[in-house]
Image (cartoon, rainbow, N blue to C red):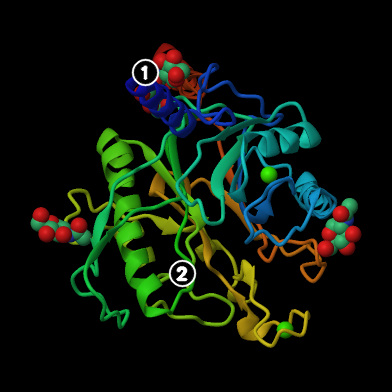
Amino acid sequence: MKTFATFLFLLFLILKISCYAEDCPTTTTANEDRRSDVENFRLCHFNAKFLFDGNDDPSPSPWQNSTEADKHYENVKELLAPMECDMIHLAEVEDCPMLQRLCDSLGSAYKPYMIHGTDTYTGQNVGIITKIDPETNLTRSTERVWFPVSGNECGYSGEADDYGVSKNLYFKVKVSDLKILVVGAHLRAFPTSPEPCARREAQAVVIRDVIEQQGLSDGYEIIALGDFNDYSDSVEDSSSNVPLSRSLKFMREGYENSTITTSLFNVALKTTQENRYSSWYDRNSNDVDDGGNENTMIDHILVSSGIYEKITRVVEWHEYDIEDPYSSDHWPILVDISTLEESASDSFSLNVSILLTLFLLVFFNF
Ligand SMILES: *[C@@H]1O[C@H](CO)[C@@H](O)[C@H](O)[C@H]1NC(C)=O
Ligand SMILES: *[C@@H]1O[C@H](CO)[C@@H](O)[C@H](O)[C@H]1NC(C)=O
Ligand SMILES: *[C@@H]1O[C@H](CO)[C@@H](O)[C@H](O)[C@H]1NC(C)=O
Ligand SMILES: *[C@@H]1O[C@H](CO)[C@@H](O)[C@H](O)[C@H]1NC(C)=O
Ligand SMILES: [Ca+2]
Ligand SMILES: [Ca+2]
């Protein structure tokens, strides 16, 4: 009897742990494309700041009840609607029902994809809403890496330990003729604090491993994006921050054990320095965005060369009243990627005209 009770209890635990009713990782219509303009792929990223429903939320959420959470939800919806993104990667999401709510508000072409991570303290996850369905089911890396990674200069003097990425996702998708691996993540906060800095380098190794093993090794183009909570090593932000960790470098170029060293490009290279900020930190707590070093670029979109060369526009989207108490403390990033296919019929008609010219030359003995 006791054994049976234990069995039931274990079964209950397993079901509770392994089966979030709210997860939505499964693609049933692989690569289905519901964009209104198939010649452009508009990719966006946004840290929405606790996109939660206000019911039974973890205590770190700033929204005390559903009235407050709903005000924040409306604020986020109004920010995102005019951006008309085809795919939005979102950080700080509660669950699939919240993403579904956003899809219902923004238009029927969107579908949500998310899988719960392991950040039980904040309850936050990364997820996407998209007009093009993934080709593979959404999944996440559970790899853990030892830190400090050799050569670390974060000033960390604690013991070595291993660390993973509690909030990450990846999937493959075909957008027109581009075969892409998308990797999303929300990395450990605080760019220059020694311990988070050292932990974040381990997280960057986990992300780079996904990029190499799931994408580059198969010849896929790469999109790696998210709130990386660190400064870029390759492009200066509006307040000229220099990274203490090698996190962005690892994700872009690889690290000591990389087997594929293909480099990625930060899309912010396409914008001007004064626009390069994605996050507001109210250093002097006056509820005013004083600019300067209150604005930093810690959200990034890294892409492989095949995508980088097709970018027609990058916008660090600052059309947002960030001082509104129900706003996020981040701004979105928008990238337009040309997916105008160099169709076979173009080269065929060119060949036909060449042949015709040759024919005329020969026939009329010019
Ligand atoms: C995706 O997940 C569903 C449901 O678990 C499964 O039936 C399907 O085989 C998976 N697809 C792939 C490509 O793994
Ligand atoms: C929700 O929380 C806010 C802030 O604490 C409070 O002012 C408001 O009265 C609360 N509303 C409800 C319906 O509980
Ligand atoms: C690289 O490989 C070595 C040998 O297996 C290992 O000790 C080290 O931790 C690895 N580095 C990283 C950053 O994983
Ligand atoms: C002619 O057609 C071939 C086969 O489709 C194509 O590979 C080639 O690029 C075309 N040549 C020109 C000049 O368009
Ligand atoms: Ca909730
Ligand atoms: Ca301020």
- Look at the numbered discs 2 and 1 and tell me whether their residues touch, using CB distance below 8 Å: no
Q: Can residue 196 be seen in this view?
A: yes
Q: Name the residue under label 1.
A: 1
Give x and y (percent) for residue 329.
Answer: 68, 66
Q: Could you say which is closer to the camera, residue 176 or residue 223?
A: 223
In the rendered view, does 41 fall on the left or right side of 221? right
Q: Could you say which is closer to the camera, residue 306 or residue 242?
A: 242
Q: Could you say which is closer to the camera, residue 67 or residue 240?
A: 67
**Crowd rating for badge 2 (residues with CA inside 10 Å; few <14, some 14–19, many 20+):** many
Q: What kind of residue is marked 2?
A: Asp
Establish whether ligand 1 lies closer than 8 Å to the Cβ of label 1: no
Q: What kind of residue is marked 1?
A: Met
- Above or below, 14 against 247 in this view is above
State the image quarter where residue 34 is shown: top right
Q: Can residue 355 be seen in this view?
A: no
Residue at position x 60%, y 24% from top? 33
Establish whether ligand 3 lies closer than 8 Å to the Cβ of label 2: no
Residue at position x 48%, y 73% from top? 190
Q: How many numbered badges does the structure rendering display?
A: 2
Q: Distance between the residues labelled 2 and 1?
A: 55 Å
Q: Name the residue under label 2.
A: 230
